Image (cartoon, rainbow, N blue to C red):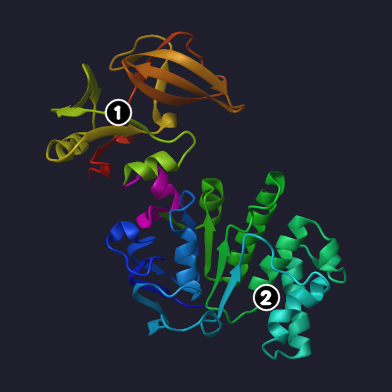
Amino acid sequence: MARIEFDRIAHAYAPKPQSMADYALKEINAVWQDGGAYALLGPSGCGKTTLLNVISGLLKPSRGRVRYDGVDVTDLPPEKRNIAQVFQFPVLYDTMSVFDNLAFPLRNRGFNVNDTTRRVHEIADMLDLTPNLNKKAAGLSSEAKQKISLGRGLVRRDVAAVLFDEPLTVIDPHLKWNLRRKLKEIHEQLKLTLIYVTHDQVEALTFADQVILMVDGEILQIGTPEALFENPRHKFVGYFIGSPGMNFLPCTIAGNQARVDDVAIALDPETAACGAGAKGKLELGIRPMHLVVNDSPVDGAVAVVVKAVEDQGSYKILTLMLNAHTLRARIPEGHPVPQSQAWLTFPPQRTKLFADERLVA
């Protein structure tokens, strides 16, 4: 395994970029620690796969240096970096057996027969492929084929990291959970450095110890799933993480209150003090599940109009209007559902402030 470091990495596909807008990756400084499980998360086209290909050596960055355990590998091709990469669509030898597909990376590097057989069986057991070891890959399901592809990436003990580029996209939704669980178990057993690209927040938040959220070629935040959910440092992080995402309301600060139009919302005193000194457009942010929905007036609550109710099974999503502003609130099953009007309480400790889309802290 290796500690992977990006030192001022930027990449443009155009031969002569004129400005940072021409770069698929803006300047990135980041570290992937040895043995960590990381998810690169973001919308399509944000630069996730480009970043992964710079790590693997499939792309040489336009600027900056890539280091493995302090050694500069920027100019080394993929085969010299000791990286395993698993792609969106399984890369297999269809006419070979499952065993031979898993054994191929080891045989190609001269491992002896006994070590190869032992390791193939270990990985096959982890991925529930043992019953299929003697079957041809061509006749197996898409899930089994992707498991083989995953196994080919995991079978070598000496890799610096295993890179996954949206490996579950072709898998049926009801089977994805099993494969995510398997990857998590394998990471805990083998302590491999895993870097996983996805646009699916559920995959990222359930798989990774650290999530790296990207947009427009930039890293907006790196942190645990809990940190990104509870303390988004950018408005986009709050919007992108969570279903539905964080609510945002334009506001001003008056003492220990945020004022949305003519409505006063209490803030934590420290948050209010930071907001009073902040420059730029101020917005209040709060998660839908942190809003307290009342079906009758209570002290400090804000009156809103109920526009829609969506039943999600174990909870309901309410669409509400505060003057001209749309809010969404999440209430648990069994909670009273207001019919036309409700009163919202904003817990101060859960209410954030953003200035020019950046968290005020």
In three-dimensional space, the C-alpha distance between marks 2 and 1, rounded to whole angstroms, equals 50 Å
Q: Is residue 37 visible?
A: yes
Residue under the image location 28 percent in, 63 percent down: 18
Residue under the image location 73 percent in, 80 percent down: 104
Q: Is residue 127 visible?
A: no
Does the stretch in magenta take in 98?
A: no
The residue to which callout 1 is attached is 249
* Quarter-of-image position of residue 217: bottom left
Q: Is residue 321 above or below residue 44?
A: above
Q: Earlier in the sequence, mark 2 or mark 1?
A: 2
Marking on residue 155: 2
Q: Which residues are magenta?
A: 214-233
Q: Position of residue 8 (x, y in %)?
A: 31, 70
Amino acid type indicated by mark 1: Leu
Q: Secondary structure at mark 2?
A: loop
Does the stretch in magenta take in 221?
A: yes
Residue under the image location 35 percent in, 33 percent down: 286
